[in-house]
Amino acid sequence: MMTSDDTRRRELGEFVRAHRERLRPAMFGLDPGSRRRTPGLRREELAGLAGVSATWIAWIEQGRELSVSPSALVRLARVMRLSPAERSYLFAVAGRADPEQAEAHDDAMPEELAPIVAALAMPAYLIDRAWTARAWNGPAARLFTGWLDGAGERNLLRFIFLDPAARRLIADWDIRARRVAAEFRADYSRHLAAPEMRALVGQLAEGSPLFAEAWEAHAVVEREGGLRLFDHPADGRIAFRQTTLQPARHPEWKLVVLEPIEAAQAAP
């Protein structure tokens, strides 16, 4: 019976073979010759260019069990001239993390996202990998008093854990805050080497006993949507259904949308 590991190794082998065969010797200054069975590179040629053994390439393509290091995959991806999507797929099917993924971080806000946020009729905001709001619309500014309605700090975590206004605005603040800490840890794990992320966690732990306790618990959950309740200073108790979207080409960014719902729908 085929196991999931067998399937992964077979998929990796087929992927490498297909991309090896699409490479042309002339792309690397090699003599195309006249005795090639296929127009692509030979295994030993790919191996030489990637700094690995031909046996290693053969075993990968045969779906055999062997050690596949991230550094070898990096070299393989470069030689095979993979696109970002192809490179991500290579590492995914190999079951390895791309060691250069964090280095590709771009702090510039994707320009195509801001108009989408502004066009939405319901509260919406866009946060970066450190959960700092970089774009938001009028309904979001009205809803998040103390965070998006003035000229103060725009980081969502600092607002929730360090600003007393968040305790008054967010219903069941302590429960939501613990959940937010666990959600942020999932993102933090992807950027452990980023100094601004470590500095943010240190500041939150120093300024908020609840954050320090929640962070020490090492709970990790993915960011989820669902019911969100607020005690708004002007509108009273209001309810929303939150949805978080990640743009396909900008996975470090999150577009958060809050759909207003009737109080009756929010009741248990």
Image (cartoon, grey):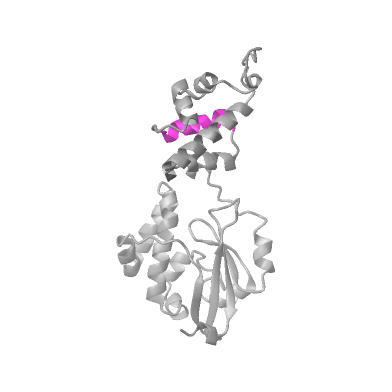
State yes or no: residue 25 in magenta.
no
Q: Which quadrant of the figure has residue 218?
A: bottom left
Residue most extreme to the front:
1
Instruction: Answer whether residue 53 is visible to the viewer in this image.
Output: no
26 vs 38, nearest the viewer: 38
Give the side of residue 18 with respect to residue 159, left or right: right
Give the side of residue 245 with respect to residue 221, left or right: right
Q: Which quadrant of the figure has residue 66?
A: top left
Instruction: Answer whether residue 33 is visible to the viewer in this image.
Output: yes
Residue at horizontal 50 percent and vertical 72 percent from the top: 226
Residue 61 image position (x, y, % from top left): 50, 30
On screen, residue 138 above or below 89: below
3 vs 225, nearest the viewer: 3
Residue 65 image position (x, y, % from top left): 40, 33
100 vs 61, nearest the viewer: 61
On screen, residue 145 above or below 101: below
Quadrant for the N terminus, please.
Answer: top left
Residue at horizontal 33 percent and vertical 65 percent from the top: 214
Residue 127 image position (x, y, % from top left): 54, 61
Q: Which residues, given as a range, are shown in magenta? A: 68-81
Residue at horizontal 44 percent and vertical 66 percent from the top: 158
Q: Main secondary structure of the magenta part?
A: helix
Give the side of residue 211 with respect to residue 112, left or right: left
Residue at horizontal 60 percent and vertical 53 percent from the top: 248
Residue 137 image position (x, y, % from top left): 63, 70
